[in-house]
Image (cartoon, rainbow, N blue to C red):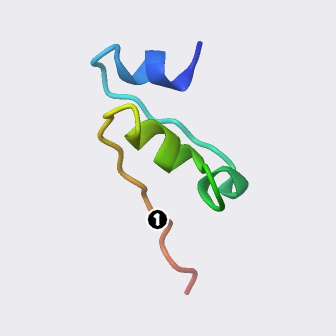
Amino acid sequence: MGIKKLILQKKPTLILVGSGHLVGKENLIELLQGESLSLQRLATAPKP
């Protein structure tokens, strides 16, 4: 099942991707925002 289809199910959804998909030209965030989807990037807590 594709990411867009998961998001459009209107259920709470957590999708984890590798960091390489979030940087550079045509990254995943930009591609999905171009589909008028609301996204939120979550950061991990810094290590003590």
Q: Residue drawn 58% across and 42% down? A: 16
The quadrant where residue 42 appears: bottom left
Side (left or right) of 47 relative to 40: right
The quadrant where residue 32 appears: top left
Q: Residue drawn 67% across and 57% down? A: 19
Image location (x, y in percent) of residue 47: 58, 81
Side (left or right) of 37 relative to 45: left
Q: Nearer the viewer, residue 8 or 25?
A: 25
The relative height of residue 41 versus residue 2 in the rendered view (above or below) is below
Quadrant (top left/top right/bottom left/bottom right) for the C terminus: bottom right
Q: Label 1: how many residues lie within 10 Å, few (<14), some (14-19) or many (20+)?
A: few
The relative height of residue 22 versus residue 28 in the rendered view (above or below) is below
Image location (x, y in percent) of residue 45: 48, 72
Image location (x, y in percent) of residue 17: 63, 44
Q: Residue furthest bottom?
A: 48
Instruction: Give amino acid for label 1.
Output: Ala
Q: Residue drawn 57% across and 44% down? A: 28
Q: Nearer the viewer, residue 22 or 34?
A: 34
Side (left or right) of 12 relative to 14: left
Instruction: State the residue position of label 1.
Output: 43
Q: Residue drawn 34% across and 13% down? A: 9
Quadrant (top left/top right/bottom left/bottom right) for the N terminus: top right
Helix, strand or loop at label 1? It is loop
Side (left or right) of 48 relative to 32: right
